[in-house]
Amino acid sequence: MNIPFSPPYIDADIENEVLDSLRSGWITTGPKVRDLEILCAQLSGVEKAVAVNSWTSGAALVLKWLGIGKGDEVIIPAYTYSATALTVLHAGATPVMVDVLDDFTIDPQKLKAAITTATKAVMAVDIAGWPCDYDAIKQIINAEDVRSKFNPGNEIQRKFGRIALIADAAHSIGATYNGKPASIASDITIFSLHAVKNVTTAEGGMICLYLPPPFSNEEVYKWMKLNSLNGQTKDAFSKSQGGGWRYDIVSAGLKINMPDICAAIGLAQLKKYPGLLLPERERVFNHYAAFFGSKNWAIMPPARDEQRISSYHLYPLRIKNITEDQRDAIIQKMADAGVAVNVHFIPMPMLTLFKELGYRIEDYPNAYKNYAHEISLPIYPQLTGEKCTYIEEQLEKAYKEVL
């Protein structure tokens, strides 16, 4: 049996939506992007959503809007994909890494200890579809002693009057928090729509705006649309309308707009996400949970508690009392059996760039422990029960052979 890790879900509806875009003669940013933004905003419980060409560019745009730059600090977990930190570096600011909890998410107490007068934002990361403890994070950033040391550097930061809370929700579209979409648990939530994500546009991202008063989400949406297209006052679709050619450049924007040909894929997927694709991912997750729940060597990932329900993006299984080398040997045996698995993530302090910047993995013991024990199993709607059983059996076999 040959089981890939994360193939995209493509059916006739998706093909037809893409063909509709191709046949319309309009393939760059236009009506499909608009429809995708509206549908994503509705499903996420927010007023406005901004489509961009990747999570990374979406985060860059958010930091640009916040005016974060040289001398500023953004607190992030050490256990995440490198894009979380790279966007902060590209803004000219300093990523301040903190350790994580056993559930992979940022440790609120470590976060609190890392706050300084230079802290402008917290970028919390939902790992594998599991939301952070946003109530705890908000309690910290809203505390009087923390607000009193907040040092705004511009008018937008003064309007906040506190540290801004950004959710790196690359994994968690469709997750819930306190019975509502998790995307309203922070000021701004950024989804990834990359090829391996729960909903994909091949490449893409979505910024969901849930800003508090006195901000206008409508006005911020307009600013972000303008600055996702070079600061140009008209997009290509508007310019193409009769007599609408004249435009102006009013800001030093970025070029990160999503094209319609990509939005078409995501639009078709998002239409069936709540009723089909998300429940199917939960089915696979529960299949694994039923098997590994009886194994005393397995640490199962969280799926739901009183506050949170996962989006079931990954199944980050951890194995007790193994070394990193033993974990890697199990992964190789899985590959030999035709099963592609993965690891999420190599903690950033272990990567060359961040080591050269002075980060040390020894400062993040829980991040390393989670990483060394973790194997991500495939989750996607196309996985049949038979294939799930095969994956489970091969992992147990590999564990026994290695240990």
Image (tube, rainbow, N blue to C red):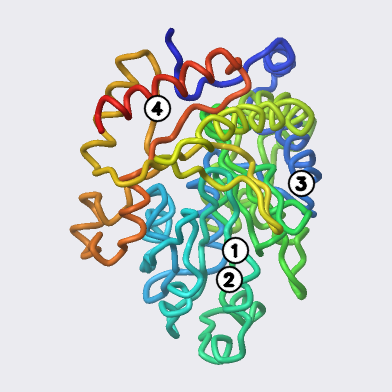
Q: Kindly report the distance in space between the C-alpha atoms of the residues bearing marks 1 and 3.
A: 22 Å
Q: How many marks?
A: 4
**Element under disc 1:** loop
What residue type is disc 4 on? Val
Of pointers 1 and 3, the one earlier in the residue sequence: 3
Of pointers 3 and 4, the one earlier in the residue sequence: 3
The single residue placed furthest to the left in the displayed view is: 356
- Contact (Cβ within 8 Å) of mark 2 with mark 1: yes
Please tell me whether mark 3 or mark 4 is closer to you in this view.
4
The numbered disc on residue 137 is 2
Residue bearing the label numbered 4: 341
Q: Is residue 338 left or right of residue 134?
A: left
What residue type is disc 3 on? Ala
Q: Is residue 279 left or right of residue 56?
A: right
Residue bearing the label numbered 3: 41
Q: Residue at x 31, y 63 (%)?
A: 364
Q: Kindly report the distance in space between the C-alpha atoms of the residues bearing marks 2 and 1.
A: 6 Å
What residue type is disc 1 on? Asp
- Contact (Cβ within 8 Å) of mark 1 with mark 3: no
Q: Kindly report the distance in space between the C-alpha atoms of the residues bearing marks 3 and 4.
A: 32 Å
The numbered disc on residue 133 is 1
Which quarter of the picture shows residue 10? top right
- Contact (Cβ within 8 Å) of mark 4 with mark 2: no
Residue 179 point in image, percent of width and height: 78, 54
Q: Kindly report the distance in space between the C-alpha atoms of the residues bearing marks 4 and 2.
A: 32 Å
Which sits in the foreground, 175 or 213? 175
Q: Kindly report the distance in space between the C-alpha atoms of the residues bearing marks 4 and 1.
A: 28 Å
